[in-house]
Amino acid sequence: MAQGQKIRLGVIGANVRYGWGTRAHLPALVHLPEYELAAVCTAHQETAEETAREYGVPLAFHNHLDLLSHPEIDAIAVVVRVPQHYRLTMDALNAGKHVLTEWPLGASLQETQEMADLARSKGVHTMVGLQGRFAPAFLRLKELIDEGYVGEVLSCHLVQVRPGVLTRTSGRTWQRDRSLGATTLTIPFGHSVDCFCMCVGEFSEVSSVVSTQVPRWYESDTNRMVDVTAPDNVLVSGRLANGAVASVHVAAVPWHGSGMRLEIYGREGTLVASTDLTAQIDPVHIEGARGSDRDLQELPIPERLSYVPEGVPQGEPFNVARMYQAFAQAIGEDRRVEPDFDTAIARHKLVEAVQAASDQGRRVVYSP
């Protein structure tokens, strides 16, 4: 593509009536000057056309292959349920499109590896939806650590506890099946631990407990209880590649989750990042103390780390918008920008190591 040319983007999974695409992706994209929102695709033509009218999109499809064959599409965003990521992403890659796919990239490490390998062979640019990497607070936290604010990192602790639900409609209970890849381990843990690893470094070994504490959900529209194999609590302890020790607890509980808190302790200081809800979506604030200071003080986040074009809403679209800006940069400058599909491989490897450590009841050595 020519430098400065708008990227003509097609979004698969852009149903205006519901879903992450219409909550986060479309409200971000319509304000980004790097993109022309050229096409939307949903499972039914009528909802595709409804979405196209709502957002002023010229093309609407219900068959993704028709979208992929259109000559005026440069890149594809795959924003659908996890079990569909593999087929849609592989089709987009085979069509020679740049691809942004939501996290988790695949339902398994094997699927993820195949997608990354194909993208590399096609010479296209990719991105995976780990948008927490673009949260201003985590970018600043990484800067502070790299600048030596805490000195040598000695220990870290991350906890994120969100309220879950015991009652769901049948359209949402598919997530109860661990094999379909949309669980507390893959999604909340995957997102939060990616922010963690970006700031303090990768794990080198893990021990863990991955547990389903609520083994049945009530399906409200069918009036039945359904069995659940998806985990809702993930506890990890281990060591980072830099020698620090670390622990992580990510959970979905029936009531009154306490939010996210990341604590980083070093030889020379302490940093704490926290939010009432989730790491990758909600505004995070940072506190720190150095040397003999006993009290944590709030640390400012520079405006340069918070830029989005005017009109991009706060909340769910904000970090997604910043992710799309990085994707455009990768395409425009023809260079790698993380988190891409290779980043996704590293994160899926960690997820599988955590599951294996729990299943086998032993420490597992991990290498991204």
Image (cartoon, helix red, strand yellow):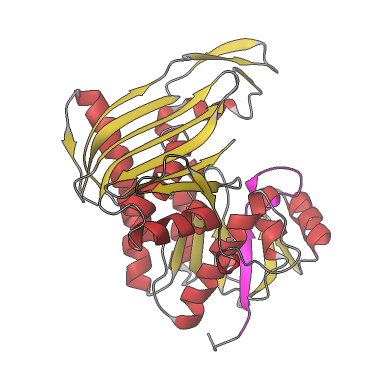
Q: In this view, does 253 lie above or below 42?
A: above
Q: Where is residue 197 in the image (x, y as percent from the top left)?
A: 35, 49
Q: Compared with residue 15, is residue 275 higher up or lower down, i.e. above or below?
A: above
Residue at 62% from the left image edge and 69% from the top image edge: 9
Residue 313 occupies quadrant: bottom right
Residue 235, percent from left and from top: 34, 27
Q: Can residue 231 be seen in this view?
A: no
Residue under the point 46% across and 14% down: 215
| Quarter where residue 229 is shown | top left
19 within the magenta span: yes
Q: Farthest residue in the top direction? A: 224
Left or right: residue 1 versus residue 32 is left
> Can you tell which quarter of the image residue 57 is in?
bottom right
Q: Which residues lie in the magenta part?
A: 5-22
Locate residue 360, reporting x and y percent: 19, 25
* Residue 145 against residue 293 in the figure, above or below: below
Choose between 355 and 325: the one closer to the eye. Answer: 325
Seen in the picture, residue 35 relative to 150 is either above or below; the reply is below
The image shows residue 212 at horizontal and vertical percentages of 41, 19
**Numbered label tally:** 0
